[in-house]
Amino acid sequence: EVKTRGKNGYQFFDPAFYGAMRQRKQRERELQAAIAGNEFVMHYQVRVEAATQRVASLEALVRWNHPTAGLLYPDEFIPLAEETGMIVPLGELVVDSVCAQIAAWTRDGCAPVPVSINVSSRQFNERDMHALFLQSLERHGIPADRVEIELTESTMIRDPVRTSERLQAMHALGIRLLVDDFGTGYSSLSMLQQLDFDLLKVDKSFTHRLGGDGQGEILFTAIITMAHALGMKVVAEGVERPEQADLLARLQCDELQGYYIASPLDAVGVQHEIRRRQAAMH
Ligand code: C2E
Ligand code: MG
Ligand code: MG
Ligand code: MG
């Protein structure tokens, strides 16, 4: 239907387009209800030190437990949440449920592993993240160094001055700052250093280029050398094969994350994974 539009003039009743619009409106209403009733669950994926295999952190990844469609992944609702602005209340739910989970793990005597939280551009620019994190940490009695924030390069470019102020305030609390999907945006390393980032998460597309024509190795070597010179650590995301993990460790990449290390797991599963790893180390 879409193909016939354009050249031959406007088609007022395009059933496919109309159907898609209705479907989108329906999803929007569902998402609204999901936020009101908190239908979200967090999964957690470990990030390990390349040299020791010690668990450095857990990344919190949101899933929507949809009443009829089952468990939905971020790709199916984060873009809509971003477009509609619903990412702001959704993000508040995420921060609060992660903090509640950390508090529950602490009560259960689990190892005090930090958790990193993804914050998208619109969310960061429309909500005072410093205040949100501070409120949630206080409400659940959690020290600030138990959480990290993951931002993409686009977030910093939109409003560098305000972003810098907010990030500095969060850093001063003890929250570690991470750049997500590094290499896919347009930030400079000097900007990242000025913003005081602790760690660069190199995008998985770079990891997937390792072991081919050597270009992946060249890119990682350059990023790692510069990041270390500027006082930042580097984590490779999307590590799926043992050869990638070996190569990255040899290139002095500090940390690894990906299906080869561990898949994202629910709150119970990830604690099993941490204990299994701790037992294997001794
Ligand atoms: P991201 O932050 O870059 O997260 C990494 C994504 O890669 C996750 O997908 C993870 O499950 C997946 N992944 C992990 N290991 C591997 C691997 O070895 N190979 C491959 N191919 N993929 C791997 P997921 O959970 O579907 O999340 C997708 C994106 O949605 C995230 O990308 C993040 O940008 C966003 N997101 C997730 N949770 C939240 C949230 O709570 N808030 C916000 N604002 N965004 C979120
Ligand atoms: Mg992330
Ligand atoms: Mg990423
Ligand atoms: Mg991503």
Image: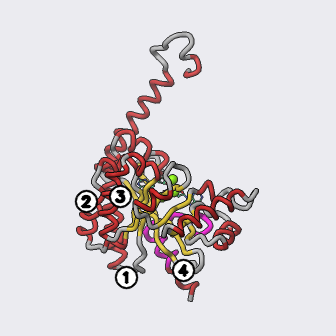
| SS type, badge 4 | helix
Under mark 3, the amino acid is Val
Under mark 2, the amino acid is Ala
* Drawn side of residue 102 relative to residue 58, left or right: left
Residue labelled with disc 1: 109
Residue 57: in magenta span: no
* Drawn side of residue 50 relative to residue 146, left or right: right
Judge the density around disc 4: few (<14), some (14-19), many (≥20) Cα neighbours within 10 Å.
Answer: few
Residue closest to the eye, 236 or 19: 236
Residue 269: in magenta span: yes
Residue closest to the eye, 105 or 237: 237
- Quote the CA–CA distance across marks 3 and 2: 15 Å
Circle nearer the N terminus (1, 4):
1
Under mark 1, the amino acid is Gly
Quarter of the rendering containing residue 178: bottom left
Q: Nearer the viewer, mark 4 or mark 2?
A: 2
Labels 3 & 2 near each other (Cβ < 8 A): no
Q: Residue at x 61, y 72 (%)?
A: 252
- Quote the CA–CA distance across marks 4 and 2: 36 Å
Residue 131's mark? Answer: 2
Residue labelled with disc 4: 276
Q: How is the structure coloured here?
A: secondary structure
Q: Residue at x 38, y 55 (%)?
A: 40
| SS type, badge 3 | helix
Ligand 1 within 8 Å of the CB at mark 3: yes
Judge the density around disc 1: few (<14), some (14-19), many (≥20) Cα neighbours within 10 Å.
Answer: few
Labels 1 & 3 near each other (Cβ < 8 A): no
Under mark 4, the amino acid is Arg
Residue labelled with disc 3: 94
Ligand 1 within 8 Å of the CB at mark 1: no
Q: Residue at x 45, y 56 (%)?
A: 191
The segment highlighted magenta reads 258-274
